[in-house]
Image: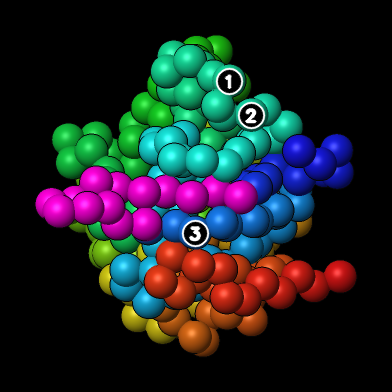
Amino acid sequence: MSEKNYVIEVEGVNRIFPVPGGEFQALKDINVSVPRGNLAILKGRSGSGKTTLMNIIGALDRPTSGAVSINGSPLVRMSDRERENLRRRDMGFVFQAVSLIPTMNAFQNVEFSMRLAGIHAGRERDKRVEECLGMVGLGNRARHMPAEMSGGEQQRVAIARAIAHSPKLILADEPTAELDSAMAAQVVKLFQEMTRKEGITILMTTHDVGLMDAGDMIIELEGGMQVHRNEEE
């Protein structure tokens, strides 16, 4: 692995799944390096391998061959417990389907992620929750339940939850798919601000061509193969 300041390093990754009568190769020799504090856009049609790659980078799946390192730590050398701790402490996840806990208000949903990350200091934790809700423009909605919020507001709470424990990496899988274009643009603008202000690295999948220019780099997959990569200097 490189000694440069990369948060994500993927080298020669292949992923093969057994299927009736043979095998299916979902990823073929993927090589990706994402520097710290970058917003990387992962694009490709359905079935291109985007979610498979995201799951491998997120330590939710293992490659058939190849190497993956997160913040300089090779995933292959980690036990299941170490991988779980990495996800809880160093990663944040934002999904297309908002997965807020319906019986908790916005403040409690964000606070819960910090508890999972092992952050238990009372007042400082509460201050961070308030700060993150303010960052997503929902400081005045902290006591509202998910059912009392629009889809866009719920997604912003999910983003606040993902960043509250100050992760090094956020993986966002189609986070704007259910939002209108104006709200999608706001979410991506928020991601850009987080890379600059918080130094967080973000890998985001999207089908929206209107959002491609927002990234510092674009990685495109087609049929499990890497067909395009563009890094801005």
Where does the image place residue 15, in percent across and percent down from the top left?
42, 48
Segment tinted magenta in the rendering:
12-25
Where does the image place residue 68, in percent across and percent down from the top left?
60, 39
Mark 1 and 2 residues: CB-CB less than 8 Å, in contact?
A: yes
Q: Tell me the amino acid under the disc marked 2.
A: Pro
Q: Tell me the amino acid under the disc marked 1.
A: Arg
CA gap, disc 1 and disc 2: 6 Å
Where does the image place residue 201, in percent across and percent down from the top left?
66, 50
Closer to us: mark 2 or mark 3? Answer: 3
Name the residue: 48% across, 15% down. Answer: 79
CA gap, disc 3 and disc 1: 22 Å
Q: Which mark is residue 213?
A: none
Camera sees residue 186: no
Report the magenta stretch's main SS: strand
Left or right: 131 as drawn, with respect to 233: left
Q: Judge whether 13 appears above or below 176 on screen.
A: above
Q: Judge whether 60 appears above or below 40 on screen.
A: above
Q: Which mark is residue 28?
A: 3
Name, please, the residue furthest toward the bottom: 210
Which element type, helix, strand or loop, lies under badge 1?
Answer: helix
Which residue carries the number 2 mark?
74
